[in-house]
Amino acid sequence: MFYELYLRSFCDGNGDGLGDLKGAEKKLDYIAELGMEGIWLLPIMQSPAYHGYSVTDFFAINPIYGDLKDLRNFLYGAHKRDLKVILDLPLNHTSPSHEWFLKALDGEKPYCDWYLFLQSEEWLKARRHWDNQQVWSNYSGRWVYALFGPGSPDLNFESPSLWQQIKEVLTFWLSVGFDGFRFDAAKHIFDFSIEKGICEYQHSRNIAFWKEMTSHCRAISPDCLFVSEVWDDARIVDMYSSIFGIGFNFPLAEDLKLAIASRNAESLVKALKTDMQRFFRSKRSYESGTFLTNHDMTRLVSSMNGDRDLALLALTVLLTLPGLPFLYYGEELGMEGVYDEYFNEEQLEPFLWYENGYGPDQTEWKALGKNRPHGGVSIQAQSGIAGSYFERFKNILRFRRDNPWLRFTTIKSISRKKDLVRINLHGSKGNAILYHNTGNSRATLDTTGTPVVINGRLEKQRGRWSMAGLSSAIEVLDGE
Ligand code: ACG
């Protein structure tokens, strides 16, 4: 399991109200005790943007997070606890304040080849692939391709010298001690057709680019870990993932939450059969990066309309599937936050260490709008309190940590009887059956074996096992 960490909101190590590397280092035990095997660090490079995805220097750390020494200490501390750390690298674009872009606007070589300038008025008609937004931004009278808006002009990978430059970026961060990367916007490297003047993904060229970049990294560090962010349907995710080794399973995240929020067992079965299709086979070319939420999405409890039992059911289903799970910071507290396209950033709120919202470690870079003080969400309010959301969440994480074999299982079948979903798995422990009760009423398990509860309540009455609503259990059929 990997913990997706937004430094600015996590832990303040120097008292300026902003989360930083020193602070996160202090909390490495906390992360390791959750059962994590790694950390995905959201971008830490120099950037004027709160989210860090528009970079002004790919070789420098944002000073609010600390310096290279702080990073090395953080990585050392993580490795000492067997936590791998991967860095989020947004290579598709830069900030408009990046030196490269300023020089490009001045016509300086090679930088003017590293961005795409408008070559025909016709191109202005191009619209973004998924939402019809315009893709050209005007900078001092020059139109430049900027898919994610004026704050991030795209790099133009037609230029071979840019490929070389990016390899240097990769070499640099590996030499600092990262164990790999989460490659942002992986399908966008070539996404504008110069021939046609329209937005069009060129998947084979993107794949060629990533092949070269990942080979470069593997030549330096053979065990490098890569996760690709390709937010698309399963067919496209599939095309990219084998190069990286791990691909985020976006369709699963979306379908699983929808099915559980609507308490629809049939939809859940359908979602799992479709989105985990590859995992019905024992031979696969990549692992699924499974997750429920990330920084671009509404938080888990909010997507369950505030129903925490449903949120825990979703978590249990996710953590009993094959794949490498990624958990977004603060989900363990049941923090809420709705992602909306107008960037209210609720889903990035400070992690709550204290009930009153103040104290050492607490970050305060933005007001707590959704997760208000005294709302019972903080670590202080929940830690060690039996039955709290945090403790129940941790129990499910612990179950996954204690059963690492689940990561590499093959799904044999998925079926349902009314609200009870049954998943048959095969793994190194032999065969196992998972039971998830998606309804509110008690469900009887059709077994003479000995199932074990993962979340919720399981009882044996008059020789028959039955499980309370929204509970999950596992039955391992063959011993090791
Ligand atoms: C990454 C980061 C994000 C970041 C950027 C830019 C990229 O996680 O935080 O923004 O550095 C698209 C891109 C992703 C991108 C998201 C935000 N995420 O592909 O790389 O936008 C459709 C599209 C997707 C699209 C998605 C969401 O196909 O391409 O993602 O919508 O908008 C089904 C379909 C699937 C469809 C979904 C949802 O699943 O199969 O195709 O996805 O439904 O409809 C950051 C900031 C920004 C800033 C930028 C520079 O957050 O504010 O502008 O940096």
Image (tube, rainbow, N blue to C red):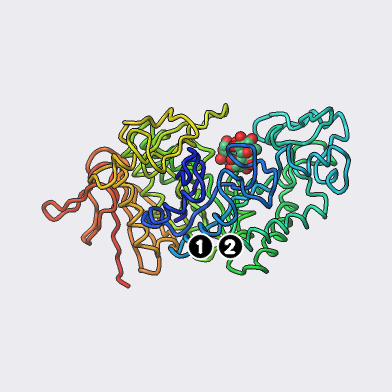
Q: Residue furthest left?
A: 462
* Quarter occupied by the N terminus: bottom left
The answer to whether 285 is drawn above or below residue 298 in the figure is below
Mark 1 Cα shell of 10 Å, populated few (<14), some (14-19), many (≥20): some
Q: Where does label 1 land, which residue?
A: 76
Amino acid bearing label 2:
Gly
Q: Is residue 132 visible?
A: yes
Does residue 365 appear to the left or right of 95 in the view shown?
left
For the point 13% across and 51% down, the residue is: 461
Question: How far across and how far down the image is residue 440, in percent?
Answer: 26, 37
Where is residue 149, by image quadrant?
Answer: top right
For the point 86% across and 49% down, the residue is: 110
Amino acid bearing label 1:
Tyr
Q: Residue furthest bottom?
A: 480
What secondary structure is marked by label 1?
helix
For the point 77% across and 36% down, the residue is: 145
What secondary structure is marked by label 2?
loop
Does residue 236 appear to the left or right of 365 in the view shown?
right
Where is residue 446, by image quadrant?
Answer: bottom left
Question: How far across and how far down the image is residue 416, in percent?
Answer: 34, 47
Q: Where does label 2 land, which residue?
A: 177
Question: How far across and how far down the image is residue 380, in percent?
Answer: 30, 41
The image quadrant in which ligand 1 is located? top right
Q: Are marks 1 and 2 in contact (CB under 8 Å)?
A: yes
Question: How far across and how far down the image is residue 447, in percent?
Answer: 23, 57
CA–CA distance in space, label 1 to label 2: 8 Å
> Residue 236: which disc?
none
